[in-house]
Image: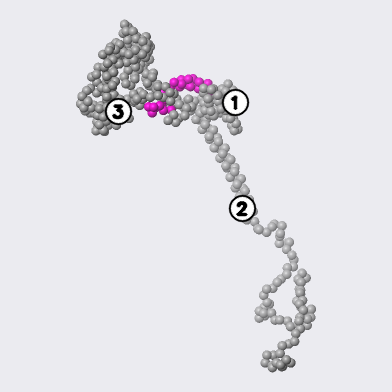
């Protein structure tokens, strides 16, 4: 059975259709298709032939004929139709029924008896009452179709960062699941603004090179995997899958880039083994650091004990002992001897006192003898003074 790949609908869907054997078609020909929704216009994207379909691909319908003049006129009129009243009514009823729905686009089938309205919503909604009231207000058959973020990007259309038309518009037939693991395998920045497309989801192009990266990944070690280089036990700290190069950490602060042929490693390691190996390395490092901290604490403790013991000793230098003190020490009496009035009596003439009766003076004490100045005694105060010669 001959089939043809054709693009149709506002969503720019790509599906396979049966082709009559007497109908000759070529790429970019416009045809009339019969789909599940009715009669629609389409464009041939792949020449007719015996195409082998995948398990998830189905025959969406059949090609009826090439368009006539009447079909082309009807199609142009439908493309120029203004759907702004439909959009306003949609928003009004969505607000009335409190439904979180966002209008995307509308289209009319070639038969002209039905309008298809596309909208987006976060969750599945029950809009049966909404459809009834919406159909009565429009006056025609209305089919509501909820689409995802990728289909919404198809409807709006745009150009990607590569400068080409979005892949979902140009040639993607069915969307394939794209996961964050693909970005991690390709060592791409995990910034959502860099790996997300216009639809807000992960870029479909992440899937294109995923198979190549998975095949090349088998010939290089994983990040953090133990390896051997130059006969030494090392580990890989950075891996270039496409370049087949590895940055080797020798453990002594030296890191060098080596090719895969210069190292030895076990190819059957998994991410679980890498996590276990990193955990063992971390535990070993923590144990070594704890041992160093304990040894440092012991040293500080011994130093502190010696310091405390030194501070607790006598402040006198150990070379000075009690036996080294002088045998005779001068005694200086600050207080008068007992039995006196507490005041020293003056000596009138120290020369009249014999030296034998003077107290002994230590040999190391110098005695200063002051001369006595002799003067005439003053007369008593009550005696009359003799007159002077001047008077």
Distance from label 2 to label 1 (Cα)? 53 Å
Return the residue nearer the eye: 79 or 35.
79
Q: Which residues are magenta?
A: 195-220
Question: Where residue 72 sits in the image (x, y, percent)?
Answer: 28, 15
- Mark 3 Cα within 10 Å, few/some/many (few <14, many 20+)? some
Magenta segment includes 86: no
Mark 2 or mark 1, earlier in chain: 1
The residue pinned by badge 2 equals 308
Q: Is residue 39 above or below residue 368?
A: above
Numbered disc in front, either 3 or 2: 3
Return the residue nearer the eye: 62 or 312.
62
Return the residue nearer the eye: 231 or 22.
22
Numbered disc in front, either 1 or 3: 3
Question: Where residue 7 sits in the image (x, y, percent)?
Answer: 34, 17
The residue pinned by badge 3 equals 103
Helix, strand or loop status at disc 2:
helix
From the viewer's perspective, tell me whether residue 169 is left or right of residue 306: left
Question: Where residue 104 sits in the image (x, y, percent)?
Answer: 31, 26
Mark 1 or mark 3, earlier in chain: 3
Numbered disc in front, either 2 or 1: 1
Distance from label 3 to label 2 (Cα)? 83 Å
Residue 229 is tagged as 1
């Amino acid at each position: 059975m001959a089939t043809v790949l054709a693009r149709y609908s506002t969503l720019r869907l790509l599906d396979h259709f049966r082709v009559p054997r007497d109908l000759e078609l070529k790429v970019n020909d416009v045809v009339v298709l019969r789909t599940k929704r009715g009669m629609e216009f389409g464009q041939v994207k792949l020449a007719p032939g015996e195409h082998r379909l995948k398990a998830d691909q189905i025959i969406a319908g059949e090609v009826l004929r090439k368009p006539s003049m009447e079909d082309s006129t009807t199609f142009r009129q439908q493309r120029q139709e203004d759907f702004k009243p439909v959009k306003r009514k949609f928003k009004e009823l969505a607000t009335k029924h409190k439904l979180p729905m966002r209008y995307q686009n509308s289209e009319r089938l070639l038969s002209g008896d039905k309008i298809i309205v596309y909208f987006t919503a976060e969750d599945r909604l029950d809009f049966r009452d909404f459809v009834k009231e919406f159909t009565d207000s429009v006056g025609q058959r209305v089919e509501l179709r909820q689409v995802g973020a990728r289909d919404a990007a198809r409807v709006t259309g745009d150009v990607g960062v590569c400068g080409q038309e979005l892949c979902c518009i140009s040639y993607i037939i069915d969307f394939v699941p794209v996961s964050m693991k693909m970005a991690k395998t390709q060592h791409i920045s995990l910034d959502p603004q860099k790996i997300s497309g216009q639809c807000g989801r992960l870029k479909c192009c992440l899937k294109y090179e995923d198979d190549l990266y998975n095949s090349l990944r088998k010939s290089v070690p994983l990040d953090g995997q133990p390896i051997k280089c130059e006969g030494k036990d090392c580990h890989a700290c950075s891996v270039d899958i496409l370049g087949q190069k590895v940055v080797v950490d020798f453990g002594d602060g030296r890191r060098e880039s080596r090719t895969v042929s210069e190292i030895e490693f076990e190819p059957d390691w998994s991410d679980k083994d890498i996590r276990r190996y990193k955990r063992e390395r971390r535990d070993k490092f923590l144990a070594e650091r704890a041992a160093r901290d304990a040894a440092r604490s012991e040293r500080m403790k011994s130093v502190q004990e010696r310091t405390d013991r030194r501070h607790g000793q006598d402040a006198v230098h150990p070379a000075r002992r009690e036996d080294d003190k002088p045998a005779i020490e001068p005694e200086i009496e600050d207080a008068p001897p007992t039995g006196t009035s507490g005041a020293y009596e003056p000596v009138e003439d120290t020369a009249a006192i014999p030296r034998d009766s003077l107290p002994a003076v230590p040999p190391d004490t110098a005695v200063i003898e002051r001369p006595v100045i002799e003067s005439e005694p003053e007369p008593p105060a009550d005696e009359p003074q003799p007159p002077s010669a001047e008077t």
